Amino acid sequence: MNQQERTLGQAVDDGRGAETTRDEPGHIVAAHPMPVPLPVGAQSRGRRRLRMAVVVLAVLGAAGGGGFYWWKQSHPALPVGIAFGNGRVEADEIDIDTKFAGRIAELHADIGDMVKAGQVVARMDTRDIQQSLKKSQAQVSQAERAIEEANANLVQARTQQTLAAQEMDRAQTLIKNGWTTQETVDQRKQALDGANAGLAAAEAKVAEAEHARQASQHDAQFYTVNINDNDLVAPRDGPIQYRIANIGEVLPAGGKVFTMLDIGYVYMDLYLPTQEAGRVKLGADARILLDAYPNTPIPAKVSFIASQSQFTPKTVETQSERDRLVFRIRVRIDPDRSKAHADAVRSGLPGVAYIRWNPSVAWPANLQGSP
């Protein structure tokens, strides 16, 4: 075929919804996909999903707005003169440890028990110390008998010394009249000197026996103290937080048996920027609102103000970062109040502490607490 033929726009349907054109017979040069309409069901599902997303966003927005409104109503703006900061209520933890190495013989408390100061919570095995105590007590009895014997010897020595002194006096009187010899006087003098030495020795024996008794008594008291120290007692009022060891376990000196909370020292640490912390004074009135008791303000007092500021999260010296300088401040709840509500003390409860650094400012209604 000599004639060039170009058939432009000739459509050939290939059966798959695509349009092709030919420039020569039997040669396809281009293909243009035809738009395929979506099923009616898929279009309706897409519209339903869009409507659902709009509804969900509307509900979330309404809930957020309502929550913000409630928060604003329940947390009115604080007057100037009151600072606040987040923190957690803490109580001092006290470890109840052993003084000596030994085996736990008895446990008289467990986790969660409320104990009183001086209450015995555990006892160590003290059979070996008790035997040493009995030995010292026997030595005390022996020393007392030695004292009795030394006192008897002392009486005898005094009697002999008295007799020797009387004979010496007679000999000196007789020799003046020539009725005795000098030899007799010398003998009486030697006898008197011996009696004096015997008396001094008897007195020393008594003192030695008394010192031996005192030493034995001190040993007995020492073992008694050790036995008493093997009774582990609670140093403060508070609940048992942890039990670390059990009956029959052998612990080294300083081995931990219990950890308790001191409900007489309950506090919250908060951090205030330099501008507010500089106005806070020791003893300033404070209030604590716990998340668990949002409508019960707890009166407290400022008991500690850090003498040095700290940076969060790192040390920065630039002018623009000075607002990141904060001071740690501790507000402490009155010990009597803490003890009166010992069953409600929970270490680690989150909350907010409010400090009134200006005494002339009145507390808002939601922070009014009993004095």
Image: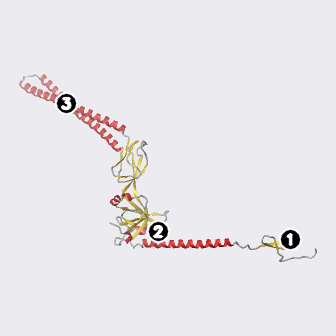
Per the rendering, the mark at residue 258 is none
Q: Secondary structure at mark 3?
A: helix
Q: For mark 1, what is the residue?
A: 27
Q: Which residue is mark 2?
A: 323
Q: Determine crowd level at label 2: few under 14, some 14-19, many 20+ residues with C-alpha closer than 10 A.
A: few
What is the count of numbered marks? 3
Residue at left offset 76%, top offset 73%: 34
Q: Compared to 245, does 366 lie above or below?
A: below
Quarter of the figure with the N terminus: bottom right
* Residue drawn 58% across the image and 73% down it: 54
Q: Residue at x 89, y 76 (%)?
A: 5
Q: How far separated are the C-alphas under marks 1 and 2?
A: 77 Å
Secondary element at tag 1: strand
Q: Earlier in the sequence, mark 3 or mark 2?
A: 3
Local crowd at mark 1 within 10 Å, few (<14), some, or many (≥20)?
few
Query: Looking at numbered disc 3 in the image, what kind of residue is underneath it?
Result: Ala
Closer to us: mark 1 or mark 3?
1
- Tell me the amino acid under the disc marked 2: Asp
Front-most of residues 292 and 167: 292
- Residue 62 horizontal/vertical position (percent): 51, 73
Residue 363's place in the image compared with 350, above or below, is below
Task: Give the mark, 1 or 3, whose residue is nearer the N terminus.
Answer: 1
The residue labelled by disc 3 is: 152
Quadrant of res 156 = top left
**Quarter of the figure with residue 351:** bottom left
Counting from the top left corner in percent of width and height, residue 113 is at 38, 52
Depth order, front residue of 46/278:
46
Amino acid type, mark 1: His
Q: Nearer the viewer, residue 92 or 170?
A: 92
- Residue 304 can be seen in this image: no
